[in-house]
Amino acid sequence: MKKKKIGVYICHCGGNISDYVDVEKVRQAVEGDDIVFLAKTTMFACSDSNQRDMVEDIKANDLDGVVVASCSPKLHLLTFRNVSVRADLNKYTYVHANIREQASWAHSDNKMGATEKAIHLVKAAIAKSRYADALETNKIKAIKAVAVIGAGVAGMKAALSLAEKECDVILIEKESFVGGRVAQWDSLSTTTETGKEMVKRLYNELVKHENITILTNCEVIENKGSVGNMLLKIKKTPRYIGGTCHPEDLKRAIEVCPVEVPDEFNFRLTTRKAIYKNYPSEYPQTPVIDIKNCTRCGACEKVCPAIDFSEKEEILEFSVGSVLMATGFDSYTPAYGEFGYATSENVITLPQFKRLIDTQSDKLIYKGKEINNIAYIYCVGSRQTDGENTYCSRNCCTSTIHAAVTAKTKFTDINNYHFNRGLRTYGKQEILYADSLSAGDIYLQSYEDGLPTVTLEGKKTIVKINDILTNGREIEVEADLVVLVTGMVPRADNKVGSLFKIPKGRDKFYNEVHMKLRPVETVIDGVTIAGACQGPKNIAESVNSALSAATKSYSILSKGELETDPLVATIDPEKCTWCGACEAACPFDAILKIEKGTKVIADINNTVCKGCGMCAPVCEPDAVNLIACSSAEIMSMIDALV
Amino acid sequence: MADINKKSAKILVFSTEKISDPAIDMAGLLKLHYPPTVYTISIPCSSGIKPSWILYAYEKGFDGVFIAADGSDCVYGESCTEKTGHLVGKTHNLMKERGVEPARLRMAAICSVCSESFVKQMRTFNEYLLKTLHA
């Protein structure tokens, strides 16, 4: 048999690998292997130029296979399989070695250890390459339907994009109404459309599509299967208002409800009833009864016949091929006493301030007092030096300046004082900053070690700063209202993320495979992410990522079938004596009992076998092996790793 | 630097492509350090590990073997946990027969986000192996 000839490429990954792993030492350690025809280092193995070089190398030297030692195979396994295909090799002759996540980064505290480990990992990949034969892919049916979880603007836009591609969409919203955070805002920056108008426009487009199913008050509680065919179990909480009824009856029911609870829609600035809608044009148009706070007094039932407390929780089931997560964000809640929060009555957060200016006209009144001087303290809960939130929440500077400009335009005698740590009104948002300066807003700045202070002096609230823009001069403002510019934090309720096992990054938001190359994919096959569940984003950025995630989810399913690796079990007829243990172990009924000559042996149904390998360890005569995971391969890798 | 490596036991990890591999990769991404003599071999499912592979690893010089099991997250079905447990039990018996301390084989469910758990497992297993084999 002809001896294999392979090429080995060891990637610097810029410096991500070579800062900790001596890649030249790795190359020298493997170049002498009997099947290694060429061994090279490369600055970026994934770059177009290197991919072209690889194709030329393979063709010019008639190579039988390739090993690339670079980042996680989750990121570039397919890239290099495709390189092999372009060089007329079977893609399964390609073998990947992960020397970034599992060597250079994991052992960045020990360069020698990282280098030694990288050498062993590449040698193990070369050992595996000896057995990497040409294979044909299997094909499985993919359900052309996507579950979009979260019906905020990102989820709604993703649903529309998918529906236009003639893909069935199940849009699942945990809350009683669609729109998410954007429904809470009136005036938006860089557009004349309000948040509520935007939500209304999107909802009206959604209901025109017959292939979109909108589910509100619904939560995914179970997920089975894998990419192409995922069975979701969904819990639907009743609204307790059924059928049709006269709007006046509903209005009266809300009026007679005796319950008053803090209104989360207005960030607890106001109260609402147990039967409620957040605003008149909210969708769906049917109100909802907050059963947790309802006392079941019966007052609403007497005036509105549509109220139906007999409604029961339902469990719905849907099969989809992919899941798109657009579950949004929470706003940071300052700690007790942080810049006077909860200890001073005129300290509120930015989301509260935005609701305050949205719900008032002529004069800005808070707790019965007219507001003139407003102090905005930036980066509260973001860019923390002591806390966990070290990241910049990036949208808050623009959002604050927009709110300040809106307040000044809408109300009389408003003076805005911005206590910031450097402004980040990037791109076109810089126009807002210019508007704010033109309107006379005052900007005062400090570093993280000289944050402003909020103190109560009698009935006065004083905000002080040593302003670095005026050479550290102490400046104080008597503020009628202090607005804490709070940033975005990951959802506290992560049940759905845990259900799908979506990894989180250091900032605790959902993590993509690669922020530049695969920005909406997760390591969970078939699950994409969009909007602010991935990290702080403004509306435009959320919509961009939603459209990207929709396209990616659709691209997985568009052909109606998925290619899967042909890594199925094989039976050695010489060793097999048919004991039935493999048949009993197989959860997919992929093992058949057949007669072969004079022997009764096991056989594999390749169209059913999923390649789990559960049949292999139970075989006493060791007659079962998995393709690409055989005993010979595993043991040769163990030899290389020791 | 060489001393650092001498303080590390050689551990072979059988990890699964869809469940525990992402957690181990994430540990690297988060720069959560563990001994560099921990090597991973990826397999589809933890219930497909043959006891002969584990015994071979000891024979060739590995101090410990760790199975980063799928647990209840296994994409191939609920029976994975029971089957993986069974193969570990079977391997423990074979280890005893060969005079290999069964405690040198450990298993824990490592889900796709269990990076910290994986690193903790590696550190404690390393300490145990150093104390019992290299003291």
Image (cartoon, coloured by chain):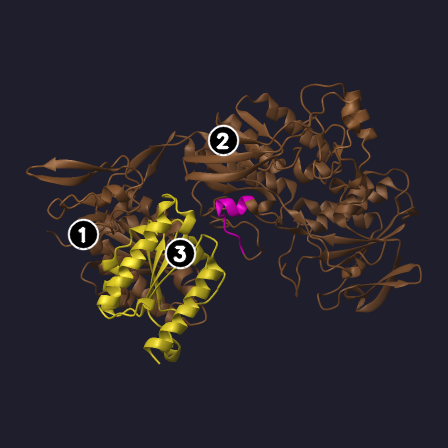
Chain colours: A brown, B yellow
The residue to which callout 2 is attached is A317
Tag nearer the camera, 2 or 3: 2
Disc 3 packing (10 Å; few <14; some 14–19; many ≥20): many
Total label count? 3
Q: Residue at x 30, y 58 (%)?
A: B89
Relative to A431, does residue A109 appear above or below in the rendering?
Answer: below
Callout 2 touching callout 3 (CB < 8 Å) = no
Q: Chain of mark 2?
A: A
Relative to A286, does residue A442 appear above or below in the rendering?
Answer: below
Q: Amino acid at mark 3?
A: Cys
The residue to which callout 1 is attached is A622
- Tell me the element at label 2: strand
- Tell me the element at label 3: loop
Q: Chain of mark 1?
A: A
* Residue A590 x %, y %: 26, 37
Q: Which mark is residue A71?
A: 3
* Residue A458 x %, y %: 93, 62
The alpha-carbon separation of the residues under discs 1 and 3 comes to 34 Å
Sooner in the amino-acid sequence: mark 1 or mark 2: 2
Q: Chain of mark 3?
A: A
Query: Splitting the image into 4 quarters, where does residue A88 fall?
Result: top left
In the rendered structure, which segment of residues is drawn in magenta? Answer: A496-505
* Residue A500 x %, y %: 49, 44
Q: Is residue B129 magenta?
A: no
Q: Amino acid at mark 2?
A: Glu
